[in-house]
Image (tube, rainbow, N blue to C red):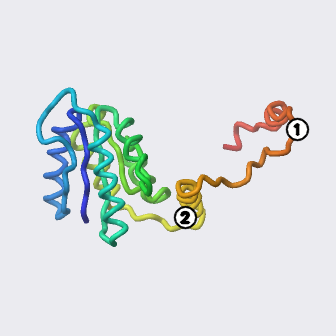
Amino acid sequence: MRIHIGTDHAGLEFSTQIQHHLAAQGHEVIDHGPIEYDPLDDYPAFCIRAAQAVVRDQAQGVEALGVVFGGSGNGEQIAANKVLGVRAALVWNISTAELAREHNDANVISIGARQHTFDEAASFIDRFIATPFSGEERHARRIGQLAAFEQDGVLLPDPRAGRSENTMTDASDSFDPEAG
């Protein structure tokens, strides 16, 4: 599989280690990050380029995923999600890595390099890559809704539309915290 990597200075050392880890597993790794440490560099362009490459590869039928790194992973996820067709998930444990693929068909994950050890991050990435999308109808339907919104800004009808102006009272009267 082709894996696109993007990071800034905060994840540079992590990125290098991850690239070696993934290459040793037989993945084709493409680095979109900086070529040298610069404490003042900015993550958006690096992460957006990695995300664009994932979308481009997938559109051409190439099996590809992306991993973006930064100090917390938050800004990097936001940057990647600005690319049409990207579903980037912030991952902080094995479960979120697995669910990102299984339920959300995420094609990019973001990890906070300052939040995890190398072994933790490598395990998240390995699980992300190994987990297929479940294909369950409810998950596919939701992903379809996200894609439709990206294309034309259309949402499903608002179930609150046309209700009385006192919807907060109505909603709180029937709120059941156990219902989830």
Q: Residue furthest front?
A: 152
Classify 10 Å Cα crowding around label 1: few (below 14), some (14-19), many (20 and above).
few
Query: Going by the image, does 2 lie left or right of 77?
Result: left
Q: Real-space Cα distance between discs 2 and 1?
A: 33 Å
In the figure, is residue 69 to the left or right of 136? left
Q: Residue 14 carries which label?
A: none
* Amino acid type assigned to the residue bearing label 2 in the image: Ala
Q: Give neighbour class at mark 2: few <14, some 14-19, many 20+ (Cα, 10 Å).
A: some
Residue 102: which quarter of the image?
A: bottom left
From the image, state whether disc 2 or disc 1 is nearer to you: 1
At horizontal 20% and vertical 44% (from top left) the residue drawn is: 33
Q: Mark 1 points at which residue?
A: 164
As drawn, 162 above or below 58: above
Where in the figure is residue 150, as x and y percent of width and height?
53, 54
Furthest-left residue in this view: 36
Q: Is residue 130 above or below residue 93?
A: below
Tag 2–tag 1 contact (CB < 8 Å): no
Instruction: Locate residue 55: give its quadrant.
Output: bottom left
User: Which residue in the rendered view is the most extreme toward the bottom?
Assistant: 61
Mark 2 or 1 closer to N-term? 2
Q: Where is residue 146 in the image (x, y as percent from the top left)?
A: 55, 55
Question: Residue drawn 79% across and 44% down?
Answer: 160
SS label for mark 2:
helix
Q: Mark 2 points at which residue?
A: 140
Q: Residue at x 35, y 44 (%)?
A: 110
Q: In this view, does 149 lie above or below 69?
A: below
Q: Report the side of 167 relative to 180 (left or right).
A: right
- The residue nearer to you, when weighing 102 against 13, is 13
Residue 19 location (% of width, % of height):
17, 51
Label 1: element kind: loop
> In front: 64, or 117?
64
- Three-letter code for the amino acid on which mark 1 is drawn: Ser
